[in-house]
Amino acid sequence: MQEYYKRAAVYSQKVHPFYVVPRVRYEFDHPEGTGHEVVTDIDDTVKSSGNLRLAGLIPLGGIDAQYERGQFYPGVFQFALELAAHGTPQGLLPLPVAVLTARAKEFLFALELKTEHPVSIAYRQCGTDNGFDGWGLGPVLYGSVKEWIVWTRKGRRKFKNFKRLMEIDGTHAAARGCATDYIFIGDTGEGDTKAGVKMCETFPRELRAMFMHAVSCDSEYCITPDDYTINGVPVLFFKTYVGAARKAYEAGLMDKAGVQRVIDRSVMELELSGAPRDCSKWEDMEMDIEQALM
């Protein structure tokens, strides 16, 4: 079966130039009844863009001004692991995290999420810390320079790449005897909402939920939209990953112990960042913790 997966990975890269597949992605075998795959954006979802702009106009990755550029959001890796691990039988690795990113494939020499990239390392370390050695990033689907220039096209590209991911996963699901369902994590900054809505409209049976990180170019003020559903798929907005974990629990996608682990990890990581206690980061975190523990 592993040899089949390896051949499929090579084939996918020949057919789909936006698709990059780490070999380890195809060494996981799941029995029938499992298969939550977390699909995530990177910039302003996993790490902050810092609202850096080219010539003061074109966002370089996103619009979030609350966190410093390149800073990981507290609890982001633990949250993804808890979603992926929920319902996975003991002794099996959760499915790895797939990535939909607007990063241009033409700039992969500088932007590729290689195994030694800090994002890749952080996911693997989170897996190791939780007893899942080998868990981490799986397939990464990139955008192009066209979307980098015309950012309004980013949502369209991510939706197309999501369909490519489903095509590849569908082939592997047939081989392992079970289907894969998906949980999408993005942000409200650049095209993720548009892509996610299209996913909900087109694939409501395959998409379990859509989590959207509320970001703003104002460092102190950000409105969190109200949650809603599309074709029965919950669209859930959050400021911190503690808030996301609470909503995941309410949606049946995480247990209480998982929520607590996200809280613990988030607090630890925000403390290690050195953020002042009177800043909006702690204000958002403490508010979400209070609601999660009610």
Image: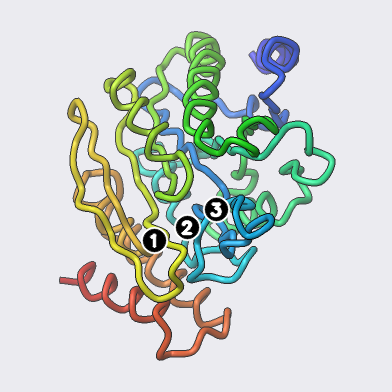
Residue closer to the observer: 218 or 71: 218
Q: CA distance from mark 2 to mark 3?
A: 22 Å
Q: Which mark is residue 241?
A: 1
Q: Is residue 276 above or below residue 246?
A: below
Residue closer to the observer: 194 or 241: 194
Splitting the image into 4 quarters, where does residue 26 fall? Answer: top right
Tell whether 206 sits left or right of 268.
Answer: left
Residue at left 23%, top 39%?
A: 234
Of the image marks 1 and 2, the number of the one nearer the N terminus: 2
Q: Residues within 10 Å of mark 1 (few under 14, many from 20)?
A: many
**Mark 2 lies on residue:** 78
Q: Label 3 amino acid? A: Gly
Tell whether 25 sits left or right of 278.
Answer: right
**Mark 3 lies on residue:** 62
Secondary structure under tag 2 reads helix
Splitting the image into 4 quarters, where does residue 111 fall? Answer: top right
Residue at left 67%, top 49%?
A: 120
Contact, CB < 8 Å: mark 1 with mark 2?
yes
Residue 63: give x, y in percent of width and height. 51, 57
Q: CA distance from mark 1 to mark 2?
A: 9 Å
Residue 101: give x, y in percent of width and height. 59, 38
Tell whether 10 sits left or right of 151.
Answer: right
Q: Label 1 amino acid? A: Tyr
Residue at left 34%, top 39%?
A: 87
Q: CA distance from mark 1 to mark 3?
A: 18 Å
Residue 14: give x, y in percent of width and height. 75, 12
Q: Is residue 157 above or below residue 251?
A: above
